[in-house]
Amino acid sequence: MRLSKRFAGLIATGLSGAMVLSACGGGGDDSGSGGGGGEGGGTFTAYIGEPKSPLVPGNTTESEGAKVIAALWTGLVGYSEDGQVEYTGVAESIDSADNQNWTITLKDGWTFHDGTPVDAQSYVDAWNYTANPANAQDGGSYLSRIAGFQELQDGAAQELSGLKVVDDRTFTVQLSTPFRLFPAVVGYNSFDPLPDAFFQDPEGFGTRPIGNGPFQAETDYVPGQGITLTKYDDYAGEDAAQADGMEFVVYADSATAYTDAQDGNVDIVDVIPPDVIESARDAFGDGFIETEVSQITYLGFPTYDQRFADKRVRQAISMAVDRQAISDAIFSGTRTPADSFISPVVDGYREGSCEYCTFDADRANQLLDEAGFDRSQPIDLWFNAGAGHDAWMEAVGNQLRQNLGVDFSLQGNLDFAQYLPLGEQKGWTGPFRYGWSFDYPAAESYLTPLFSPSSFPPIGSNYSFYDNPQVNELIARGDQAASEDEAVADYQAAEDLIAEDMPMAPLFFTEIQSVHTDRVDNVRIDLFQRPVWSEVTVTG
């Protein structure tokens, strides 16, 4: 599942680093609607696609489950609207003298929804569980910088040696190497705490989660239907829920969700289909929102497939796609052609850093010929069903046919909960739709989760299964840099190598279009491309 990288500028579902279900975009002067409205209370409904996995923070790295996790949990830190780290979560402080040995002090008074305390042990136990390969948690790779992670993967240890509980409100974290962005990383949901109840019944817990967030689960999560939440009255954070409750309603198709919003049957649809963008402006008025988010939409390549193993093939396919034409024809011009592997919303973005993102059919054909590509066999184009991707993926296919003389076959019959597991099993037989929003505000969040071997599925999001030792070394050097400028330079050098290898082709920077009914107000989409559920007020 879908952050702007500013630690001082270091998002999504994408979650987030969350793989995201829907392509999104950004824009407009305003990332929310309503100026006040509502006096608290009431309940509202919100659209989600089917989450991939049970609702456990360390196992949720895709956008749909991340939306629910964001309502049920509060992280160690929060982020401002421009991506700055803020101590609005559970952490009172996160300190280090050397960027390798960190002390985390928790605020007093935080409890889980079952009334048990959120203490240091609840973090250490959660992180050990998430990092353990025996538990097959999708977010396990996010713990890889903690000392002892590799020993845990190798079976030589049962827990992370770098974690130590000092007292109820304090624990220490030793990293394997210095990493100055650590305080920004721990706001991601893989670092959320877990109560004792989770370890007694992990499977049952994923059906009715017990978090520490502004809302608590009122019902079980029912696949294909959703889950109902109520306000947690003993919430200790600054962002207490304004509504009495909310319901996540699962839709198999975003078009159906949009129609239901028009009819007043669902209050918030965070990402609407591209073919209704123009009409939605008039249909919803002030309830139509455009938000620039951190997501990049990619066309990923299965580098494990011999047909796409030659980088020249990947370069050619990327250069054969006229991104602006697709944006104009399908997205009403609301998608910006991507020219970088790092989003403009974070420090480290360089305009035009991706040479092979430029449309050039002649050069694309030359590269394809040099690679000896068999043009007689159609290219399979993979995408998840029901999220509005059909039209633009077909447009990509038509351009490949027109510009390269290669036919295509659309493979868009799997819903999101089936789509990702197939990718984990190396089941995609051609280019695949992939969306990524940063998990925390840093350029590095667009690199390590997507292009490092430590992020191979099932514990990570490197679905192209790309591995370049030089890239790995540069990212590691950036992680250990003494200054932000030095770190960004190393990350950019890694990006240059990735842009040459093209394991994924960046297509669009994203501005998402959302709608809500006049029953709700104060709907704001954050840089992670999620509505801020606690702020929503019910007016009708």
Image (spheres, rainbow, N blue to C red):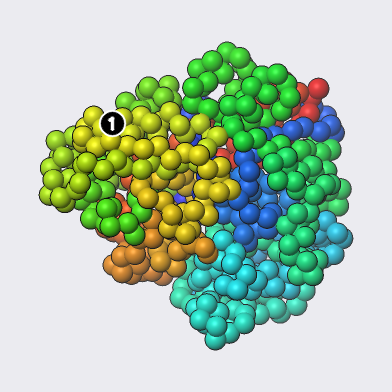
User: Where residue 153 sits: x, y (%)?
Assistant: 52, 77
The amino acid type found where label 1 is placed reads: Gln
- Across and down, in percent, residue 163 comes to 62, 78
Residue 400 picture quarter: top left
Position of 326 relative to 151 (above/below):
above
Residue 305 lies left or right of residue 335; in this view the side is left
| Residue 295 located left or right of residue 283 | left
447 sits left or right of 130 in the view? left
| Res. 75 in view | no
Q: What residue appears at the point 47 percent right and 34 percent down from the top-left corner? A: 389
Vertical comparison of 348 with 156: above or below: above
In this view, 50 is above or below 325: below
**Residue at (75%, 70%) from the top-left corner?**
199
The answer to whether residue 434 shows anywhere in this view is: yes
Query: Looking at this rendering, what residue extends furthest in the top direction?
Result: 282
Name the residue that disc number 1 marks: 399
